[in-house]
Amino acid sequence: MALDYRKCAEEIAALIGGGENVVSAAHCATRLRLVIADNDKVQTEKLEEVEGVQGLFESNGQLQLIIGTGTVNKVYDEFLSVTGASAATKEDVKAAAASKMPIWKKMLKSLGDVFVPILPAIVASGLMMGLVEFLGKAIPAFNDSAWFQFLDTVSNTAFTFLPALVAISAARVFGGNLFLGAVIGMLMIHPGLVNAWNIADGYDTWALFGNLKILGWQVFSIPAHGYQGHVIPVIIAVWLMSQLEKWLHKHVPETFDLFVVPLTTVLCTAFITLTVIGPVFALVETWILAFAKWLITVGYGIGAFLMGAIYPVTVVFGLHHMYNIIEAGMLGETGLNIWMPIASAANFAQFGACLAVAVKAHKKKTRAVAFPASLSASLGITEPAIFGINFRFMKPFVCGMIGGAVGAFFASIYGTLTGNTLGATAYGVTGIPGFLTINHPLVYTIELLIAAGVAFALTTVVWKEDAVSKKEQKALDEMAAQAPQTELPVITCEAGDINAPVKGNAVPYTEIPDPTFASGILGTGVGINPVGETVFAPYDGTISSVADSKHAIGITGAGDMELLIHVGVDTVEMNGDGFECLVKTGDEVKAGQPLMKFDRAKIAAAGHPDMVVVLLTNADDYDSVDIHPEAEQEGDAVAAPAEAPAMA
């Protein structure tokens, strides 16, 4: 039956505390996005049971209900009607969600917003650096070639001018002028300043107000060196610039705005940045990097073990972008990101846990989500695996945390014992793609296998699929009772046997009460007078088509057999009323698996025969096609596998 959009919306509204508990509501292509005033009123477990809700998760202050393409917009319209909420855009919802965040979470979110847009540039440069390094090792003469000089220059560009990239992105996030932000970023790596990597050779100090001292400290003096490789001072400087610019826009008369605001903004920000922000926060960043390196390389694996376990938790809370500062700082300082192996171990462990669920699960819906989600996690995108499977069932998530901890521990101990620190030439790339940037591929392979292997093994042992509910068991029993019990095929050809998709008595296709079917134009087969109301897969195959009106299904099998299963005659006129498809185009199905439910009473009430038409539509491709309606004379139910079908 079609989803009752109104009922779905009403149940969602009731389970989130009513319309008065909704701050903002919007939808995207598949999800209903809500910002809730009081999360304690949300009944999460019951929401997951609402018909039409395929899953849910919370992210960045939003409650996101997965409903599906083509359906979510209809449920959303009914939801607005039920709750009285006003329609909002995704940006409105994001803003509403952000306003509810505590200050520390807003800060971390801003960091993510700064670094995510520049990831393509960093990834491209990192991959190219890895390629250049590989070619240099494989072909020593390559290091002296013009190609090496060219590729090395191109690959280093993003890291050489990283502060400028960060500054532009930060200006966008903080609402400042992008070009003024770029000026501040470029100022901090100006060629007129001593390069940050050469400050050990000495640098000048610009005493802007002579030898002015306060409490013995010389003030307003600028160390004339750059901040190559640093990101924290840049972000803070651009934040200050944006606040100052917005304040000036409000207070400077429009007549002078174009001249006064940019000049004042750049000059004041530059002065404060080079005198205070740069020196202070560059030192803070150096301390942070030193601590991170100690955790990974000197902490005897304990720090790496803990971070490998904690990393996926920070993903759940949307805090993982804070590591970008550490990774970018490492790349800027030494060109090697030694934080990446921890992230890779954590991500690949979630892949192992999710894959174990996919292998062990019996429910088709769980498997359908788990397999593609695990593939995504192996490529470094873990959100589908974490939110769709692991965190939802919790035990796989915990097993993934343990696997990540063990994998990261191995990488850290290996580096400590051998002196060959594992690292990458980029950030934002983990899992299998990480091989393109990693410095020790063999060690990296072992790390990933350990992380995923531990998570997979633990999940296999400790996770068990929830028992089938009474409602599901009743439906299973009803479908099993309807399933054909003998193994006599209704159609045979060189490619194989085609079993009956429904229980009942068969007649040759020439006796189907429809001239088109009876003429054989659409193929050779049989018509079955059904006893039950469920269509089962007649063989292992792939669903090639599902009619919009849900009354007909195409299925392709071995040897390119193309079968049409058409329930009723002229039932297309019912527009789907009385039919429920349990599969979709592209699904892989097994013999005996339920494909469709239909209501014989509704078909009769509509004045149509309920005969199920089964036709091999490409019969002409085979030398011999035989049909077997003999079961009618024998009084037997026609063919299909004897085992009870699995629930869809």
Image (spheres, grey):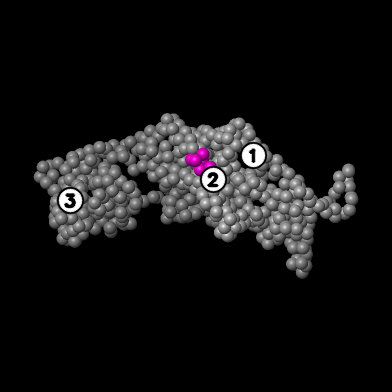
Which residue lies under the disc numbered 3? 493
Task: Specify whether 76 is left or right of 494.
Answer: right
Question: Which of the two marks, 3 or 1, is nearer to us in this view?
Answer: 1
Tell me if 135 is positioned left or right of 565 in this view: right
Q: Is residue 439 magenta?
A: yes
Query: x%, y% of residue 240?
Result: 73, 53
The residue pinned by badge 1 equals 292
The vertical placement of 288 against 579, above or below, is above
Q: Are marks 3 and 1 in contact (CB under 8 Å)?
A: no
Tell which of 607 and 298 is nearer to you: 298
Q: Position of residue 111 (x, y in %)?
A: 63, 48
Q: Is residue 229 visible?
A: yes
Amino acid at the residue labelled 1:
Ala
Q: Residue furthest front?
A: 141
Q: Could you say whether the residue bearing mark 3 is in a helix, strand or loop?
A: strand
* Segment tinted magenta in the rendering: 437-445
Structural crowding at the residue carrying mark 2, measured as other residues with C-alpha within 10 Å and reported as few (<14), some (14–19) or many (≥20)? many
Name the one closer to the observer, 75 or 176.
176
Mark earlier in primary sequence (3, 1) = 1
Badge 1 or badge 2: first in the primary sequence: 1
How far apart are labels 3 and 2 at the CA level? 54 Å
Q: Which label number is shown at residue 438?
A: 2
Residue 509 placed where, x, y %?
16, 54
Given residues 612 and 488, the one toward you in this image is 488
How far apart are the two marked residues, 1 and 2, measured between alpha carbons? 19 Å
Q: Residue at x 74, y 67 (%)?
A: 258
Verify whether residue 118 appears in magenta: no
Q: Secondary structure at mark 1?
A: helix
x, y percent for residue 439? 55, 44
